[in-house]
Image (spheres, grey):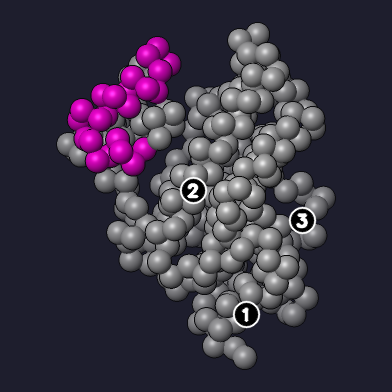
Amino acid sequence: MSRLLVIVGATGTGKSALALEVATALRAAGDPAEIVGADAMQLYRGMDIGTAKVPEAERAGVPHHLLDVLEPVQEASVAAYQREARAAIEGIQSRGGTAILVGGSGLYVSSVVQDFDFPARDAGTRARLEGELERDGSAALHARLATADPDAAARIDPANGRRVVRALEVVELQGSFAPGLPEDREPWQRATVVDLVLERESLVPRLDARVRDMWARGLVEEARVLRDGPGLGPTARRAIGYAQALAQLEGALAEPEAIDATQALTRRYARRQVGWFRRYRDALRVHALDPRRLRIALDALRADMGED
């Protein structure tokens, strides 16, 4: 019997909204469903506008886990996230509820739903590579990765400095990097997976408008408060939108340039998300704008649970 629903898809496809709709419907029917986030940047407190985090006032009383659990100066760890997310899911299930895992961070989702082990870590190696990233930039480190492990380099966005550093760390420690793509792993437990899909010609305008709205709602001021208050660690500082807002604050980018850069990076990120989740062979593909998406998700979940 499945007690785990996984909702994935590119940014801007309405994953969080659907998760909340499903949870609300299940709770109305007596199932104490709860939501577990799978977005690496939504782990951070205070990073709300740029991560499209559902405000607490709009969560309709549905408990949400793995949101606002780290300070922006801390470094997120997929291995730590895996432990905490699985514990949250098992806790929800032990209380008789359906756990709804929702998010677009592919590696984070896969770490939970698949039998996933993590390669070695070394704090000294990581610190040295982080320093080289700050000094030389992600493109230079990606070129080094391409020489050391071409397969790994081909799978990692050159602009994703954090993943490039992690791959180089693993290569130095154990000789090669295994990024663990979705088709390579056995499931952790039975799950119903819904992948929200949207054709690119419809998705891109939504993404561009979303970025403009983030600026209109005060992303630059949010970045200023974080910078001047708790501070931002390397991961939070490089987050899409926040990096550009900080550059605007520092005078390195004008506002139109910051918005344009964020839109371009968001489009590229969405493209990589689509590619990642396409490899979930057993996922149910649901059009993001289908007015029946709630009914489709509920029917799929109930079918997997053996209910009529």
Crowd tier of the residue under label 1, counting other residues whose Cα lies within 10 Å: few below 14, some 14–19, many 20 or above: some
Residue drawn at the location 62% of the way across and 43% of the way down: 204
Which secondary structure lies at badge 1?
helix
Instruction: Indicate left or right for 190 with 26 as reference.
Output: left
Return the residue at label 1. Answer: 299
Q: Using the image, determine if residue 207 lies above or below residue 162.
A: below
Callout 1 amino acid: Asp
Return the residue at label 3. Answer: 59
Could you tell me which quadrant the C terminus lies in?
Answer: bottom right
Disc nearer the start of the sequence (3/2): 3
Magenta run includes residue 150? yes
Q: Using the image, determine if residue 212 lies above or below residue 141.
A: below
Q: Are marks 3 and 1 in contact (CB under 8 Å)?
A: no
Highlighted range, magenta: 134-156
Disc nearer the start of the sequence (2/1): 2
Kindly report the distance in space between the C-alpha atoms of the residues bearing marks 2 and 1.
25 Å
Callout 2 amino acid: Gln
